[in-house]
Image (spheres, rainbow, N blue to C red):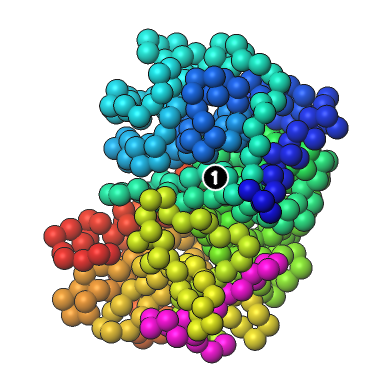
């Protein structure tokens, strides 16, 4: 291991327990843990895992909503050299089973409110160690009660040297179908990421409110830097607007990471201006594009700075937009971050000139080790520059302007090819959102005998706008779109399906239209 240093993140946690012993580290509901208490619990989890036969490098899964126990088990797994597999609560039981088997999980920690997801397959998990079913908050035959299991172990830090090349986590998409695709991160990646995110003011005085699920990288990129700096994380098991705003006021929250749909609901809340949010220093957004109009509203009414981050869980290219600093660039996702190189390529992998739309590829100091057990998928993710440099394909289409700001066009797989012409759904969605009656929208391609596929707008109306017809909205939008972009129709929906971190699930929206067609869409 010569030349490979120890995990900086884990070293920081141990230091914080000494320096900030009596200060709050975690808050969830009525339970508050200071740094000393959290450190002892992390050690107990680590030692309990080691005593039952979990070895450094082994994988351990957690299936739970956000809680203090989730964080302490996550960190305990890391401290004993294990690799965390945080399971997505939005996945179906058959997908969860594939993830557990694919990653070779030795121990499963489960919360009662998600136990129905595990029930169909848990008896088939023959890869678990004896006693490897840990019940976080329930009593059931065949399961070990978490509190007793944890507290029976020593609270002295285990003698395990976790190096920066050790695996940190394997993250699976909540939409995984077929063969699982697990994104592997190591400690080296997380150490770099933590240091970069600290520059958003995440220091020992930070109080970060986290309302997206911990299994998502969206949450981890704020949770981990806050804890590494010695700050405090306030956890919400489930997001709701009034609860979020009340926590911001009560706990004097300084930082938060939200996804666009959450910002939309917060800013639309009629009671928003009644809360004292003056403690907020920095708000972050990621996972999906944040509309320019919403960015403008946040900058005007929500205290503190606002930053949008664009990037992939796999790593590679990422961009940063300071909404409050660049009000004339709100249609973009900002400029490449520190140490990031991004290029735009065409379908043949040839780099495109400035201003041309193509696939976004990127490289940086934060790139995944690969997809777990899938070198074929990892290789398909890679674009090699003429000089041999490795970039990750994003699957997103975009362009750079003359000032170096990146503008997204669409997901490559969501691009609609109608009559041989490329139509970017994002352009059509922006036009529909300008209609006063439209609250939410998704544009998808559906089969067309004449054009191959044609764009259809699925819209959710604002409250009180139920008398506005789909035809009126469609005609209004088409008057503002180019001839080759026009919508074939608009359909009004009660809601649009979203993932747990707010991404519209276009695959689900497209499926009924394409049933019976021979297509990969």
**On the image, numbered disc 1 is attached to which residue?**
167
Q: Residue at x 26, y 83 (%)?
A: 419
458 sits to left or right of 408: left
Camera sees residue 274 = no
> Is 421 included in the stretch rendered in magenta?
no
36 sits to left or right of 449: right
24 sits to left or right of 296: right
- Where residue 441 sits in the image (x, y, percent)? 43, 60
In the rendered image, which quarter is residue 36 located in? top right
- Where residue 173 sits in the image (x, y, percent)? 42, 49
Please identify the residue farthest to the bottom as the structure is shown. Answer: 353
In the rendered image, which quarter is residue 224 located in? top right
**Quarter of the image where the C terminus is located:** bottom left
- Where residue 363 sits in the image (x, y, percent)? 57, 69
Q: Main secondary structure of the magenta part?
A: loop
| Magenta region | 336-354
339 shown above or below 239: below
Q: Residue at x 37, y 13 (%)?
A: 142
133 sits to left or right of 338: left
Q: Secondary structure at mark 1?
A: strand
Q: Residues within 10 Å of mark 1 (few under 14, many from 20)?
A: many
């Amino acid at each position: 291991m010569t030349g490979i240093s120890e995990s900086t993140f884990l070293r920081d946690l141990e230091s914080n327990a000494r320096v900030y012993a009596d200060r709050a580290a975690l808050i969830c509901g009525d339970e508050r843990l200071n740094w000393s208490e959290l450190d002892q619990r992390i050690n107990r989890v680590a030692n309990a895992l080691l005593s039952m036969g979990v070895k450094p490098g082994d994988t351990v899964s957690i299936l739970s909503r956000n809680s203090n126990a989730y964080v302490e088990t996550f960190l305990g797994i890391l401290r004993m050299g294990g690799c965390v597999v945080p399971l997505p609560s939005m996945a179906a039981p058959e997908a969860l089973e594939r993830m557990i088997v694919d990653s070779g999980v030795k121990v499963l920690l489960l919360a009662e409110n998600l136990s129905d997801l595990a029930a169909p397959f848990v008896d088939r998990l023959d890869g678990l160690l004896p006693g490897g079913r840990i019940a976080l908050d329930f009593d059931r035959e065949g399961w070990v009660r978490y509190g007793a299991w944890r507290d029976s172990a020593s609270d002295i830090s285990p003698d395990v040297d976790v190096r920066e090349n050790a695996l940190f986590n394997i993250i699976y998409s909540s939409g995984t179908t077929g063969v699982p695709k697990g994104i592997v991160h190591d400690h080296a990646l997380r150490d770099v990421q933590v240091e970069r995110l600290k520059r958003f003011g995440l220091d020992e005085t930070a109080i970060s409110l986290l309302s997206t699920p911990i299994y998502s990288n969206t949450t981890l990129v704020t949770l981990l830097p806050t804890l590494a700096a010695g700050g405090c994380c306030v956890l919400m098991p489930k997001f709701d607007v009034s609860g979020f705003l009340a926590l911001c006021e009560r706990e004097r929250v300084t930082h938060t990471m939200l996804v666009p749909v959450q910002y939309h609901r917060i800013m639309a809340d009629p009671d928003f201006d009644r809360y004292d949010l003056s403690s907020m220093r920095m708000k972050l957004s990621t996972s999906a594009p944040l509309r320019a109009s919403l960015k403008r509203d946040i900058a005007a009414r929500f205290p503190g700075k606002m930053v949008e981050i664009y990037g992939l869980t796999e790593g590679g290219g990422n961009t940063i937009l300071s909404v409050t600093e660049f009000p004339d660039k709100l249609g973009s996702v900002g400029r490449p971050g520190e140490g990031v190189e991004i290029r735009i390529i065409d379908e043949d992998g040839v780099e495109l000139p400035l201003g041309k739309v193509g696939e976004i590829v990127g490289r940086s100091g934060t790139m995944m080790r690969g997809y777990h057990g899938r070198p074929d998928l990892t290789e398909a993710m890679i674009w090699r520059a003429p000089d041999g440099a490795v970039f990750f394909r994003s699957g997103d289409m975009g362009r750079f302007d003359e000032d170096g700001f990146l503008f997204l066009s669409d997901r490559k797989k969501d691009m609609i090819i109608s009559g041989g012409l490329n139509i970017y759904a994002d352009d059509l969605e922006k036009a529909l959102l300008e209609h006063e009656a439209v609250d939410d929208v998704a544009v998808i391609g559906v089969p067309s005998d004449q054009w191959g596929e044609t764009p259809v707008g699925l819209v959710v109306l604002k409250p009180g706008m139920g008398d506005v017809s789909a035809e009126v909205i469609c005609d209004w939008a088409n008057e503002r779109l180019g001839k080759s972009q026009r919508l074939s129709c608009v359909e009004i929906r009660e809601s649009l399906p979203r993932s747990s971190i707010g991404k519209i699930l276009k695959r689900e929206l497209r499926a009924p239209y394409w049933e019976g067609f021979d297509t990969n869409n």
